[in-house]
Amino acid sequence: MPVRLFVSIMLLLLTPELRAQRTVTLRVDATAIQGRFQPNWAYFGHDEPNYTYMPYGKQLIGRLFAMSRGGVHIRTHNLLTTGDGTASLKWGSTNAYTQDAAGRPIYDWTILDKIFDEYRDAGITPFVEIGFMPKALSIHPDPYRHDFPRGSIFTGWAYPPKDFGKWAELVHQWVLHSVERYGRKNVESWDWEVWNEPDIGYWQGKPGEYDQLYDYAVDAVKRALPSARVGGPGTTNPSNPKAAAFFRNFLIHCTQGKNYATGKTGAPLDFISFHAKGGIRLVDGHVQMEIRRHLANIEKGFEIMASFPALRDLPVVISESDPEGCAACSVTAHPEDAYRLTSQYASYTAAVLRGALELAQRYKINLQGVLTWAFEFEDAPYFAGYRALMTRDIDLPVLNVFRMFGLMGGERIQAESSGALSLDSILSSSARDTPDIDALATRDDRRVTVLIWNYHDDAVPAPPALVNLTVKGIHRPTRQILLRQYAIDSATSNAYAAWMAMGSPQEPTAEQSARLKSAGQLQLADSPQWLNATQDTLHLTLQLPSQGVSLVELSW
């Protein structure tokens, strides 16, 4: 069955009569403070760096900046890859390094500056990935550019350098140039991550050669800017024994090994990064996600970190955290990725963030960032189903959950839901038997926000939940409280649903385009209203559709 037809049928069948409605009690206590609500969700990334300065890419980074008071970080592959700057799926280039006929380095920062100028102008903080290998340095330069989706992507750019000294000098000159162009204080706020997923095909050298690459890179960065923050290794799912072994051995190298660049013991490590992914498949014609796998990978990464007491307090960035592994795969070729266009992606993202925060607390991890590997695909067909935040200039439902996160802030407070699946239950059984109906809540001086989601692994019809919300600990004295309720579901804050209702036009008219842009914005479920506050507790009732997310904002 075509994916669009399948989703249309699901939307039509989504009625409360299909199953008995579930009632959930949600209690929020604004006096039970659980620490600061950090903007560790405000991390994004993509393969194609040249999209950054293209029209839709520029629009998107502006929208990302506008939704976070705490700053947005962007990571991208291919910042040192050789080429003319032409982008394609899973590819990009900057031509930062070439050599003359005598083998002398030629540094050209023109394209890199276009990328980082956009970050600077938009107020974005780069999460700088140091990679990949320039053709002139690669020990296996040909073939160099891949032809995704045909053949292997692990071509010449994935190999070790012929000369680690020249590799180090490239990194050194890059950092010096960055300080000169963007200012020392600005560059001190960047994180520099050495390479990407060196435990799999992204690194065609031996594990020890990655340690060598890391040592030379971090030494080069520190010589240019001693206060710079450098880390890694950005390995894949730690639940995989091979990935776990690579991750653990890297940490041993950084704490006990001989440094290839300096000859000293150990290597500087200012933050630690790894990746965590879930799983997606089609089951009986519908999408089935696997949040269990995603959170299990985060847990294993934290468990490995916690086994190194000397590193335990370091910041951790999950520098790719996604439902599955291929952002550049479309729904046409991979119908199981249909979740990307719907509110299920939004509810999943909320549930994963809660799980990551709880796991960080359990293992006493300093969780700095949870990076969503999604951006935009310039000039791709409308709603092609790549893992993206925007299709052309139209926002997808998942972008609105980040807007909800951005409306939260201050201190995290206690939220207890009778419909929540415990963390251990999700780690054991995922969210298959019953949905996870849970919440995150925050407070600041004159506001309480409650983010509520109704997530299930299976994209099947289900009735909305009836949520009885109690919020206690409202600051007194106050007589009136302003209620705003924002929503993401199969009909609200959902440009894809609007596009489907139009008949899926690939060349929308100006009027249709305006309607789609409007439908893609974060919308109120109802008009704002003033509530009388006669005591420090409020009681509200709301309907929360399956795979829906709601943000209740109370201000005074």
Image (cartoon, rainbow, N blue to C red):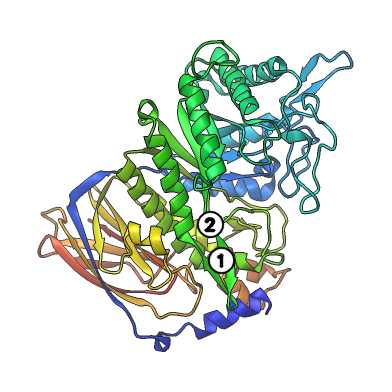
Residue 516 found in image quarter: bottom right
Which residue corresponds to the image point at 68% horizontal and 63% vertical from the top-left?
A: 384
Q: Residue at x 68, y 58 (%)?
A: 329
Residue furthest to the bottom: 17
**Label 2 – label 1 distance at C-alpha:** 9 Å
The three-letter amino acid code for the residue at tag 1 is Tyr
**Rendered location of residue 355, percent (x, y):** 38, 53
Q: Which corner quadrant holds the N terminus?
A: bottom right
| Residue 340 seen in render | yes
Q: In this view, does 131 lie to the left or right of 24?
A: right
- Give the residue pinned by disc 2: 323
Q: Residue 103 carries which label?
A: none
Given residues 278 and 465, the one toward you in this image is: 278
Image marks 2 and 1: residues in contact by CB distance under 8 Å: yes
Q: Which residue is drawn at 79% across and 29% down?
A: 135
Q: Can residue 451 be seen in this view?
A: no
Alpha-carbon neighbours of circle 1 within 10 Å: few (<14), some, or many (≥20)?
Answer: many
Residue at figure coordinates x 64%, y 41% from the top left? 200
- Which is closer to the viewer, label 2 or label 1? 2
Earlier-in-chain disc, 2 versus 1 = 2
State the residue position of label 1: 339
